Image (cartoon, rainbow, N blue to C red):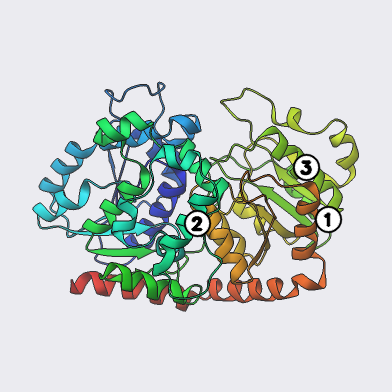
Amino acid sequence: MLPFLAMSHLLPFAHLSNILAQRGGIRVTFISTPRNLTRIHPSLSPAVNRLTFPFPSSAPDIPDHAECNIDVPPNKRHLINKAFDLLQQPVARFLEEAKPDWVVFDYLTYWLPPIAARLGISSAFFSTSTAAMLGFQGPPEALLRFPKRDALSTADASIENTIKKKSAWIPFETNVRMRVFELRKFAQIMPPHEEEEDDTAGLNDTVRFGMALTGSDVILFRSSPELEPEWFDLVSDLYKKPIIPLGLIPPAPSPGVDSLSGSTTEPTCAIFDWLSEQKVGSVVYVALGTEVEPSQDEIAQLALGLEQCGLPLFWVLRKSPWTGQAPLDMLPPGYLDRVRERAMLWTGWAPQVKVLGHDSVGGFVTHCGWSSVVEGLSFGRSLILLPFLYDQGVNARLLEEKKLGVEIARDEFDGRFTSDAVAESIRVAMVEEGGKCVTENVCKMKEMLADGAINDKYIDEFVQQLSRM
């Protein structure tokens, strides 16, 4: 198991490692750098072997002790990609000595499939997101021709039309796509133009993605045909190689361990004392993940919309290590006094899975990272969708199209949203009759995710296919 150096990838790989290691006859080795293995250590089963490679000391322009996406500011995250590439030689040496039957790898590891093929090792690309994301992006040649940073950073109606035209390979009607403001944000974290041209280690993420997919023997998805059958069919047709669903892999954290952060710190009792004082299904839980950095205006509009909706509120506000601004200082003047009687704003670590599992929580305002989505669906929470980065926009459109969530309306070009849009989406998802269909569908997904037989079926079929290949 070789995940990319980001928590949103490390943890799904850890969960899959645990599941496989619990099945007899499968020996699993999880590979990462020291600090990342320390972070996820509580989430890894003792049955999983751990292999540590030092973070490359020659990696340029990276702060000391930075080994993960969350350790560097968003505009420097491409440097983590470059450092990750420097693990190529030690990984190759390990594979040559260990001679595993399979190596499971991640979306940026474009250099791994040729190494595995040379050594006679089968390779599996593990997508920690949806089949819709890959289907929207298209066949490998579309990924390899993805626009460069300069084109995306000035994305306008012409780029939007190009994206629609490029999606001609999608044979069914769908609203699942990236929006212009999402392309612009994507451009902000792509390598600078000169690195794209002069340094292969500076390849943009989509090109790496295409190369990794093209070289893999099979593609694995943390999703299921029950959720997105049309997208699984499309990906199978586009890639002409085995497509294996693993199911959504619902959370099964150890006591005291949060599946999002890997922290073992016991949550302060004050969180659950407060939640226990609220009515069943009444609380709006707000958490935007570890990599999202909302702007001052986005925080203000979200805060005012949460105030307008009139519901009890538990909001996890993380301090940004890059701006130095205290999260509560980003709130509108007088905000804390106005919501004090019905809100808890939390600036420390919070155990997301346990919070979502509390009976008082009814709705979840989420950035639409796939792990968070799966956790919300596992507990039957109504999803209020506020995507920012990466695959989050496509995830949001898929969930809304499947009537599993309500997306907060945003401007197509600059991504701005209003407090009114926030309040309206929350009320629709949690209170109004118009959201009844979403509530019913989310409850059906909860039942499916709780069905151990369905989850086991996917993993059993996966293991059987690997044994036959």
Residue 3, how many percent across, how many down?
Answer: 34, 47
Up-down: is 18 above or below 54? Answer: below
The quadrant of the rendering that contains the C terminus is bottom left
Instruction: Tell me which residue sits at (28%, 31%) in the image.
Output: 54
Mark 1 or mark 3: name the one nearer the start of the chain: 1
Q: Residue at x 79, y 47 (%)?
A: 419
Label 3: state its secondary structure.
Answer: helix
Q: Which residue is mark 1?
A: 278
Which residue position holds label 3?
303
Q: In whole angstroms, how far apart are the C-alphas of marks 1 and 3?
A: 20 Å
Q: Residue 229 at what x, y percent from top left?
A: 45, 76
Determine which quarter of the picture holds residue 340: top right
Is tag 2's residue or tag 1's residue first in the polypeptide sequence?
A: 2
Residue type beneath disc 3: Ala
Residue to which mark 2 is pinned? 161
Task: Choose top left, top right, bottom left or bottom right for residue 383.
Answer: bottom right
Eye-nearest disc, 3 or 2: 2
Secondary structure under the numbered disc 1 in the rendered image = loop
In this view of the protein, which residue sits in the foreground, 22 or 385?
Answer: 385
Is label 1 in contact with label 3 (beta carbons under 8 Å)?
no
